[in-house]
Image: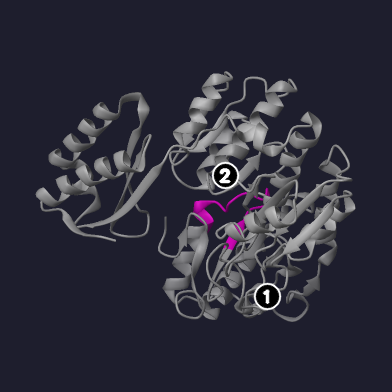
Amino acid sequence: MGKYFGTDGFRGEANVVLTVEHAYKIGRYLGWYYGREHTAKVVIGKDTRRSSYMFEYSLCAGLTASGADAYLMHVTTTPSVSYIARADDFDCGIMISASHNPYYDNGIKLLNAEGEKMEESVLDGIEEYIDSGEELPFAKRENIGRTMDYSAGRNRYVGYLISLATRSYKGRKIGLDCANGSTWQMAKSIFDALGADTYVVANQPDGLNINVGCGSTHIENLQKHVLENHLDVGFAFDGDADRCLAVDEKGNVVTGDHILYVCAKYMKDKGIFGDSKVVTTVMSNMGLYKALDEIGIGYEKTAVGDKYVAENMRQNGHLIGGEQSGHIIFGRLANTGDGLLTAIKLMEAVTETKQPLSILASPVRIYPQLLKNVVVTDKDETMECPEVKAAVEQAEKELGTEGRILLRKSGTEPVLRVMAESGSDEICEKYVDMIIDAMRAAGKLIKVK
């Protein structure tokens, strides 16, 4: 990861970490980079944060000053920008969002012409330009770029999603938690068009209430809504709708791991899964792996981040992958996590099998997990410390096949993340503390956050 861009874009508090000057320079660089041999075309979307408008205007100023044409999809989802960048032959796409973060944060996500996370070489060039103080040439006269409305792209994406549904949802009572974010209009229109009786919450954005007590990070709101209204299923999205979690008819949370299992099994039963494997990150629950083993579906594990899941899927041709948090990627249908697409594919499994979601997800037994963030003197030295390595090996040996230990570095902080997974919270606590105690004894520990 670079100085500004992490695994999910340039993100931080608006006008503190991420400023309008940063946005302007990102626009200037992209307009110049993609416009060296032709007039660059860049599509831009944003979520409902108050600062998203400010960053949109600043990006447009930078792009057009460098001679690029900026096409505005306005309030829309990250996966819709990914889809349109690919389908309508744009040079790149930009999404203004901080996803599940609070309203005062914002972010700039960059997507290439295939709708995938931007190449590191381009991000490196942007970072160098931001810090260099050098100036890029300005476009002049008829070469100055234009800013154009492109809400038609958002409508085309909605039509694409509707076309993927295999059956009508007539008679189905479906709850939608829009997180006061990007799906606040889109989600209801899609499920209404498919015939569902929709029950929508958190669809009144005011620029300050995105993700506040709602959405996939506060799913208790949707659980209550499903039970009170006797709904068949509920779907909760995050601020930019690249993730989705579900609630079954009994009010139980259906995590990304459950969704991976349900959709992979459905594809296998339909005979369309072939030799594909489910791609997960190392944070997926061991309950998912045990359930997949039971039905003979293989899996692969990547580093944390949907970026790495997507890379593995592209390289190996796998059909589905994702994270516990609800970033689910359907390989032949999208190049990024898509919450609305995930909801539609999950509904396909429910409607085609004629089984409630609680039954479809029941084979996945979620094992208790405990994660502690530990501030250390040096991440690499602590990872290689003999006392710490010995504690990890002892924990792994004692847990055997009934649990696991994960020790990994944070990509942005002087922090190690210690996770244990086993049959009870008490066992998890025991082994996480065993490893932290080893760090303390070796003089590597500063504090447990």
Q: Is residue 119 magenta?
A: yes
Residue at (49% x, 61% y) in the render? 125
**Is residue 82 at least partly visible in the picture?**
no
Q: Secondary structure at mark 2?
A: loop
**Is residue 284 at least partly visible in the picture?**
yes
Amino acid at the residue labelled 1? Cys
Please rate how many residues cluster around mark 1, counting C-alpha atoms within 10 Å: few if below 14, some from 14 to 19, many from 20: many
Reading the image, the residue beneath label 2 is 255
Q: Is residue 16 magenta?
A: no
Reading the image, the residue beneath label 1 is 60
Q: How is the image coloured?
A: one colour
- Residue 353 picture location, percent across and down: 77, 29
- When the figure is inspected, residue 22 is found, relative to residue 381, above or below; the finding is below
Residue 10 located left or right of residue 198: left
Q: Secondary structure at mark 1?
A: helix
**Which quarter of the figure has residue 153?**
bottom right
- When the figure is inspected, residue 65 is found, relative to residue 339, above or below; the finding is below
The image quadrant where one finds the N terminus is bottom left
- Distance of mark 1 from mark 2, alpha carbons? 37 Å
Amino acid at the residue labelled 2? Thr
Q: Which residues are magenta?
A: 109-122
- Residue 414 picture location, percent across and down: 28, 59
Please rate how many residues cluster around mark 2, counting C-alpha atoms within 10 Å: few if below 14, some from 14 to 19, many from 20: some
The image quadrant where one finds the C terminus is bottom left
- Residue 10 picture location, percent across and down: 50, 65
Residue 340 located left or right of residue 361: right
Residue 199 located left or right of residue 29: right
Residue at (10% x, 53% y) in the render? 443
Q: Nearer the viewer, mark 1 or mark 2?
A: 2
Q: Nearer the viewer, residue 64 or 442?
A: 442
